[in-house]
Amino acid sequence: MHTPVLQSRLPNVGTTIFTVMSALATETGAVNLGQGFPDFDCDPKLVDAVTQAMQRGQNQYPPMTGVPVLREAIAAKVQALYGHAYHPVTDITVTAGATQAILTAILAVVHPGDEVIVLEPCYDSYVPNIELAGGVVVRVPLTPGNFRPDFDKIAAAITPRTRALIINSPHNPSGTVWSREDMLKLQDLLEPTDVLLISDEVYEHMVFDGQQHQSAARFPGLAARAFIVSSFGKTYHVTGWKVGFVAAPASLSAEFRKVHQFNVFTVNTPVQYGLATYMADPAPYLGLSDFYQRKRDLFRAGLAQTRFKLLPCEGTYFQCVDISALGVPERALPEADFCQWLTREIGVAAIPLSAFYGNGFDQHVVRFCFAKKDETLNAALQRLARL
Ligand SMILES: Cc1ncc(COP(=O)(O)O)c(C=O)c1O
């Protein structure tokens, strides 16, 4: 018997750092502030709404693009918040989370040899997605230290072969939020080009200190060329449900849907109906920034008592810290080794920022996730106080 040997489509991909650190946290009993997911449950009303949909018998295939009531609710929300009218029939597609949405958008638009620009540090699925499409990954760094976009560098990376640019605000891992000026600059930069925009906005409802989320939908020149991606998992504390959506002009959505229908075809029915019912009340997503800002403040206040240097956190549920002033010799380790040590010896799991760079760029910064119960955050802070 013989199993044929494969030539890997993704030779550089191994087990993700998130899986590794979560497994290590479980093995060692560490407080897991590594992988980004809440350790508290969602609103029981949302579970009720999904349960009722199942009990009503809404259990068979929905339309390929998503159930109409959910697409209508999404279009209404985007219009109310960002002032752009997406047509629920032609412009909104419900996806199996943001991850599938991003892969599908890339497969739909990138031909072999096309260049796609990513801004590093970036979410780990972007690069393998581009490689699967046969695209060429063009890495542009966000400015080290403050993680702001460097528009001169982005402009220099654009060539006649550039098919798309992927942006992400609020930004994982750094917690930065692009300003209106940033988006206007981007709009001007892309205006004379045919570059498409994939705007990963999964943390759209987690923006702090009175700032506003600057969705690409607010900027007509960007909206006209953008696939805007969001995730109900992040917004409603249900990361395991894997439901998100893409909003894009009809001509872009049409190509997106060609790939979508032969990829997942569609997304599970009762969750879609449940989400549509639950979305009728805007309070949960309108209140999310305050909810997470309070957790951010609790966590930052605790860390301020340690020698971790806090980086700004304007949005998301991630707090980055510089480890170079810690009072232990392990501060000099590479970030990834430091995170292993922190998990094993101090009992708190974190993610090294180097994991978000193609070349493993090490700047002595690690990321904690604060989407946790207060008691979890306090337990972590108690352990980190030793540093
Ligand atoms: C920036 C970013 N994009 C996309 C995703 C994936 O979202 P989903 O769980 O809806 O696939 C995540 C999840 O961590 C993320 O941080």
Image: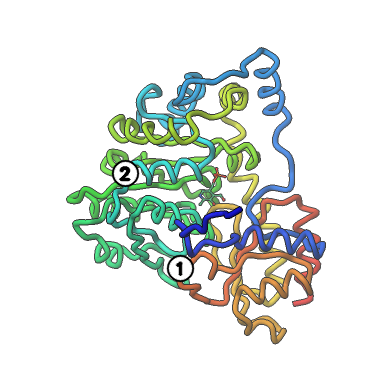
Answer with mark 2 or mark 1, whichever residue precedes in sequence: 2
Residue found 54% across the figure and 20% down from its top: 61
User: In the rendering, at what x and y percent does residue 121 appear?
Assistant: 47, 64
Question: What x and y, as percent, mark residue 199?
Answer: 40, 47
Position of the C terminus, as image quadrant, is bottom right
Q: Which mark is residue 358?
A: 1
Q: Secondary structure at mark 2?
A: helix
Placement of 335 over or under 109, stated as above or below: below
- Number of numbered discs visible in the structure rendering: 2
Give the residue drawn at x 59%, y 26%.
281
* Secondary structure type for disc 1: loop
- From what the image shows, is residue 244 above or below residue 293? above
Q: Quadrant of residue 238?
A: top right
Please name the amino acid that badge 2 sits on.
Answer: Val
Outermost residue, top side = 56
* Vertical arrangement, residue 284 with respect to residue 149, above or below: above
Identify the residue at horizontal 58%, vertical 21% (top origin): 273
Answer left or right for 255 relative to 63: left
Q: In which quarter of the view is residue 24 placed? A: bottom right
Alpha-carbon distance for marks 2 and 1?
23 Å
Q: Is residue 97 above or below residue 354?
A: above
* Mark 1 residue crowding within 10 angstroms, few (<14) / some (14–19) / many (20+): few
Q: Dot 2: few (<14), some (14–19), or many (≥20) neighbours within 10 Å?
A: some
Image coordinates for residue 324, horizontal then vertical, percent: 61, 81
In this picture, residue 217 sits left or right of residue 46: left
Label annotation for residue 383: none
Q: Residue furthest bottom?
A: 329
**Mark 1: amino acid:** Gly
Q: Which residue is mark 2?
A: 109
Q: Is residue 116 left or right of residue 101?
A: left
